[in-house]
Amino acid sequence: MFEKILIANRGEIALRVICACKEMGIKTVAVYSEADRHSLHTRFADEAICIGPAKSSRSYLDIPAVISAAEITNADAVHPGYGFLSENADFAEVCETSGLTFIGPKPEVIRRMGLKQIARAAMEEAGVPILPGSKGVLKSVEEALELAASIGYPVMLKASAGGGGRGMRIVRGAEEMAALLAQAQAEASAAFSCGDMYMEKLVENPRHIEFQILGDQHGNVEVLGERECSIQRRHQKLIEEAPSVAVSKDLRARISSKLSNALKEIGYTNAGTVEFLMGPDGNLYFIEVNARIQVEHPVTEMVTGVDLVKAQIRIAAGEKLPDILRGPVELRGHAIECRINAEHPETFTPSPGRITGLNLPGGAGIRVDTAAYQDGIIPPYYDSLVAKLIAYGSDRTEAIARMSRALGMFVVEGIYTSIPLHQKILASPDFVAGKLDTGFLARSGFLPEKK
């Protein structure tokens, strides 16, 4: 087992990894920017090193700075968390060449899964259902027009190296194709240094369903059920839950079997998430693989009893999944996660600043993953996430009741947060009934009116 792990991240996920390491008797190294000098992850790690100024490109995304911090502190492994360098194959490769274990998939697997059209091809070959679309990168506007005509409008243009909703455009007619393709390419180039695009048939207002996976270095793959992530704004998830009310035991078993075979063939190791869209027909269609731990991993932990971060570390240390999981994984009860963001609940404008008052809810079935504290600063430079509030119940009804109670007891003063929006969503009859899709917020009138 590792003696010391450097955490190449910040905020609540850095604290989450620190907690796992403390329980495992592993020392930790925190890295931080000048803006995060007083953050909790710097306080609770065994060591902390400043790696640059506030701008992430000069700190958390600065590979030489992160590697230097690991070498100076004699760390023997690096946990990337999510975001930042977590799906950067070059970073994983540099870790390996520097004698550091990267706690995640192998660099070559990250590269393959990061290029969405390659991941699509791999899944299709394994029999995983995919949406009609391009076989590879679109080479021209003419090719895009021809393909769209064959599969039928509307279609979705997506960045091959994309994520987080960037480099995506919906095309509803041939007359829009040239302009929207150019826009998507420009956005993708700016965000990912790669303007390659591919196309998929658009499923209007689908459910967004994702499956949690673990793979070890001995060829074992386990699928730990699914999460429902349909409550979104601009492709950014706001509420997640496990399991999904729309996924039957039979569908779960069939998709899990196909994914297990596909990921074994790919040689996938460590944690990851396979994302699907569910159409009105109730069928699932593969969209992408996220080769990292997800923000919403706690809901899977709550219903399976598996500590996914500890599992990541043990897999990276060479342990076998049967020894880590100790038997078949069963789903018990229901869990819901609300992402509490520093933003106005009606206009969605960012609300960074000092937290002048804070009360974190507790009680039966409640978990809060956060790096926030009284008088702490939510900086304007990074993701607006303040906390992840997770509620667990014996069934979905109890989980909703506990989440509603906890939201009412969650007090954050000094900044706006999304708590009032979450309260409205949970009180919505459609949410309570499980009638969810990615158009939920707009359909329910929870989005600001366009001027």
Image (cartoon, helix red, strand yellow):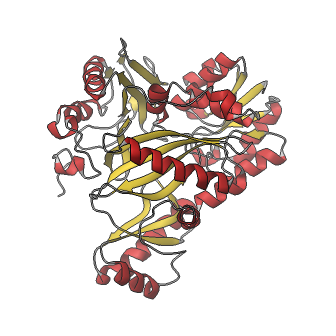
Q: Residue at x 79, y 30 (%)?
A: 75
The answer to which image quadrant residue 363 occupies is top left
The answer to whether 166 appears left or right of 215 in the picture is left
Q: Residue at x 73, y 29 (%)?
A: 5
Q: Is residue 158 visible?
A: yes
The answer to whether 355 appears left or right of 258 in the picture is left
| Nearer to me, 137 or 385 | 137
Q: How many callouts does the rendering have?
A: 0
Please tell me whether residue 100 is drawn above or below residue 254 in the rendered image.
above
In the displayed image of the protein, which residue is found farthest to the top? 363
Split into 4 quadrants, where in the image is the C terminus? bottom left
Please tell me whether residue 430 is drawn above or below residue 156 in the rendered image.
above
Q: Is residue 30 visible?
A: no
Split into 4 quadrants, where in the image is the N terminus? top right
Q: Could you say where residue 21 lies in the image, as x and y percent from the top left?
A: 66, 22
The answer to whether 222 appears left or right of 29 in the picture is left
Q: Could you say where residue 123 lies in the image, as x and y percent from the top left?
A: 55, 61
Q: Could you say where residue 112 lies in the image, as x and y percent from the top left?
A: 64, 60
| Nearer to me, 392 or 138 | 392
Q: Could you say where residue 35 lies in the image, as x and y percent from the top left?
A: 55, 33
Q: Residue at x 23, y 48 (%)?
A: 440
The answer to whether 349 appears left or right of 390 in the picture is left
Q: Residue at x 69, y 52 (%)?
A: 267
The answer to which image quadrant residue 324 occupies is top right
